[in-house]
């Protein structure tokens, strides 16, 4: 089935590029790098890399596998006739090292590389440490660790122990894993227990169950899948349990979409007919690439290769990106804080976190309570569907927004988002400036972990995203006046408060409610002073006329109500609406003129807006229109049925 092969080919090509970026990141500071391949099997990666010569320094390449694989590979390497094919450029300089050390099964050297073959149980980290030392692996040097379908066969505790030993033992290390994802393995791993697990957990897919049963029958149960199912589970394993600093997770659908160019996709599609895309996509969704490194925040070069694995414009293909921040020393024992991208399962908890933390400061403030309610209310509120609001690409296919969650011990304790700043037209200096300004928003931190560095870490995640995105020149934000702690935080992080006349106030609308007050008119002078008014509710009064001039005064076009978007005039005594009203309200989107029986005419623009408003908000109006349409359809059908069938004209 060629698409599966295509994904693997794409991964291989991109992985070689990854190695080049990895080497480029360390080439300036080190003349030697380590590559340690765990569970290497019969892979020939070392010999291909040696032929391509992409690194100017020296490679110390070490393969680790079980006794049976190592013995078979050792016999193949001992064949003198094979050396010419394996070392075409270095066969004359090849030196096979005779070693009596039981920790190294076979070793050879060429001027630019050393290759070692080790037989070792990966669950035995003490022996693995001794074997790597015997092979000449200097753990202080930049090291890339590879493991393809290795952790899935180890018991979860042994796999985590191995990951932690690698993270602690290689301070300049990076790791690339390829393993299943989205599986829920049973404790025993037998065929029967897989069935039992399927009955107990309704979320287990048929694909995952069948896959696990297949490997169980083959005698190689996927024990490592137990306890680490989702991308967030794997991020916790890598960062909190194993002490890596950063990780990125990408399933094979993402690999194919992000790491295969259009020309290659067209070539593959022309090889043979293929229509089983659903099964192929399902299969690819259950395998993932896991990238992790030990780079600190200031070590941008060390983390470069992991960020370059997927092209910049395709970063949204990652299932998850995460980083670990310094541990909370106030906690006993201290726990790692993980800042990771939002996942669908986080929706309920981040909505609750946002609501509770903001309502703390809403005492006596109706505006704050309304702001929180509007953000949570669907479908327009951005906290109603976080993925849609913050993790969806623009029409150009570029991701300019993001949302992150902070968690400790698997529990979400904070969140933050960023998106392009939206302002009303009078506040814009230019359209380009708005496109280059990001809004930091929805920052929320649980009271139990405040002043522990969680909020600062979330803000740094936003700043790192906006810097790498390349779409923004500045970040702006708004806070509630009562949030003195938040204001102090922003000042300490270098944010400057804007002068009052430059503030955006993009989160609130200025409304005027004068409904049911028996008003006879809306004075022109009043409108002249309400230049920021966005909504006006004047329902249930005695207003007879809407006009923007009288004997004493007249407003110029665009003055006073240039921002008004919603005008409610239902249940008045309107008779006349001045034709210039439509020009005076350039931003008007909603108007309600119902309940004014003596109003015989209105400007065309206002009439259309009124009818659209009725259609959207009046069930009776929608029912009337639907009934009328059905009646017309029925009448047309009856007329066609009653009409005689015309005979075709004879052609002479």
Image (cartoon, rainbow, N blue to C red):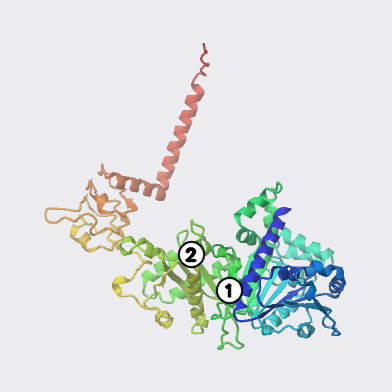
Which is nearer the eye, 442 or 541? 442
Q: Tell me the element at label 1.
A: helix
Q: Tell me the element at label 2.
A: loop
Residue occupying image coordinates x 67% and y 52%: 268
**In this rendering, position of residue 471 left or right of residue 578:** right
**Residue 631: image location, x then y, percent:** 45, 34
Q: Which mark is residue 400?
A: 2
Q: Which mark is residue 418?
A: none
**Residue 542 in the image: above or below residue 305:** above
Could one spot residue 406 in this view of the protein? yes
**Residue 444: image location, x then y, percent:** 48, 75
Which is nearer the eye, 272 or 572? 272
Front tag of 1 and 2: 1
Mark 1 residue crowding within 10 angstroms, few (<14) / some (14–19) / many (20+): some
Which is nearer the eye, 534 or 403? 403
Q: Which mark is residue 304?
A: 1
**In this rendering, position of residue 567 left or right of residue 236:** left
Residue lying at the far left of the rendered structure: 552
The reply to whether the C-beta atoms of the residues labelled 1 and 2 are less than 8 Å apart is no
Mark 2 residue crowding within 10 angstroms, few (<14) / some (14–19) / many (20+): many
Residue occupying image coordinates x 76% and y 85%: 133
**Residue 105: image location, x then y, percent:** 84, 79
User: Residue 280 lies in what quarter of the image?
Assistant: bottom right
**Residue 496: image location, x then y, percent:** 37, 78
**In this rendering, position of residue 565 left or right of residue 411:** left
User: Residue 162 lies in what quarter of the image?
Assistant: bottom right
**Residue 210 in the image: above or below residue 91:** above
Residue occupying image coordinates x 49% and y 26%: 638
User: Residue 437 lies in what quarter of the image?
Assistant: bottom left
Q: Earlier in the sequence, mark 1 or mark 2?
A: 1
């Amino acid at each position: 089935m060629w698409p599966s092969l295509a994904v693997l080919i794409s991964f291989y090509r991109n992985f070689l590029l990854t190695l080049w970026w990895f080497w480029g990141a360390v080439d300036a500071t080190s003349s030697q790098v380590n590559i340690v391949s765990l569970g290497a099997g019969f892979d020939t990666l070392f010999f291909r890399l040696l032929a391509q010569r992409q690194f100017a320094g020296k490679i110390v390449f070490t393969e680790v596998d079980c006794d049976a694989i190592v013995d078979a590979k050792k016999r193949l390497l001992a064949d003198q006739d094979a050396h010419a094919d394996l070392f075409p450029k270095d066969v004359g300089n090849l030196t096979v090292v005779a070693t009596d050390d039981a920790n190294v099964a076979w070793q050879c050297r060429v001027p630019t590389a050393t290759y070692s073959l080790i037989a070792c149980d990966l669950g035995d980290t003490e022996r693995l440490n001794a074997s790597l030392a015997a092979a000449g692996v200097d753990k202080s040097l930049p090291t890339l660790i590879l493991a393809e379908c290795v952790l899935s066969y180890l018991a979860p505790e042994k796999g985590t122990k191995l990951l932690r030993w690698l993270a602690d033992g290689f301070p300049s290390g990076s790791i690339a894993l390829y393993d299943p994802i989205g599986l829920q393995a049973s404790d025993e791993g037998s065929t029967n227990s897989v069935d039992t697990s399927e009955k107990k957990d309704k979320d287990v897919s048929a694909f995952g169950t069948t896959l696990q049963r297949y490997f169980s029958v083959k005698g190689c149960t996927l024990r490592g899948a137990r306890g680490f199912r989702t991308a967030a589970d794997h991020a916790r394993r890598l960062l909190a349990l194993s002490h890596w600093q950063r990780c990125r997770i990408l399933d094979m659908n993402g690999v194919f979409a992000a790491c295969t160019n259009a020309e290659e996709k067209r070539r593959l599609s022309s090889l043979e007919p293929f229509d089983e895309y659903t099964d192929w996509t399902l299969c690819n969704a259950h395998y993932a690439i896991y990238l992790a490194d030990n780079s600190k925040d200031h070590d941008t070069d060390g983390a470069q290769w992991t960020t370059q694995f997927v092209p910049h414009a395709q970063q949204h293909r990652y299932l998850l990106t995460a980083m670990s921040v310094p541990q909370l020393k106030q906690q006993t024992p201290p726990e790692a804080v993980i800042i990771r991208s939002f996942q669908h399962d986080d929706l309920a908890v981040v909505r609750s976190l946002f609501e509770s933390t903001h309502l703390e400061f809403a005492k006596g403030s109706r505006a704050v309570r309304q702001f929180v309610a509007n953000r949570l209310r669907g479908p327009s509120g951005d906290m109603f569907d976080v993925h849609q609001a913050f993790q969806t690409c623009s029409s150009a296919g570029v991701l300019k927004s993001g949302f992150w969650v902070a968690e400790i011990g698997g529990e979400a304790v904070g969140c933050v988002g960023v998106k392009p700043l939206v302002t009303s037209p009078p506040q814009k200096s230019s359209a380009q400036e708005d496109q280059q300004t990001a809004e930091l928003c929805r920052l929320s931190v649980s009271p139990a972990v405040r002043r522990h560095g969680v909020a600062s870490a979330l803000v740094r995640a936003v700043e790192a995203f906006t810097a790498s995105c390349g779409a923004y020149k500045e970040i702006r934000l708004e806070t509630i006046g009562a949030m003195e702690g938040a204001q102090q935080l922003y000042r300490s992080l270098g944010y400057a408060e804007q002068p009052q006349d430059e503030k955006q106030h993009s989160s609130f609308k200025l409304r005027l409610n004068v409904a049911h007050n028996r008003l006879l008119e809306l004075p022109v002078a009043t409108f002249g002073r309400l230049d920021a008014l966005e909504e006006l509710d004047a329902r249930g009064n005695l207003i007879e006329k809407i006009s923007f001039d009288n004997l004493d005064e007249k407003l110029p076009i665009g003055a006073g109500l240039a921002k008004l978007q919603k005008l409610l005039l239902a249940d008045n005594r309107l008779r006349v609406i001045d034709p210039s009203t439509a020009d005076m309200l350039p931003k008007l989107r909603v108007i309600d003129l119902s309940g004014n029986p003596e109003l015989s005419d209105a400007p065309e623009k206002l009439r259309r807006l009124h009818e659209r408003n009725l259609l959207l908000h009046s069930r009776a109006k929608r029912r009337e229109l639907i009934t009328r349409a059905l009646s017309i359809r029925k009448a047309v059908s009856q007329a066609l049925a009653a009409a005689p069938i015309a005979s075709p004209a004879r052609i002479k």
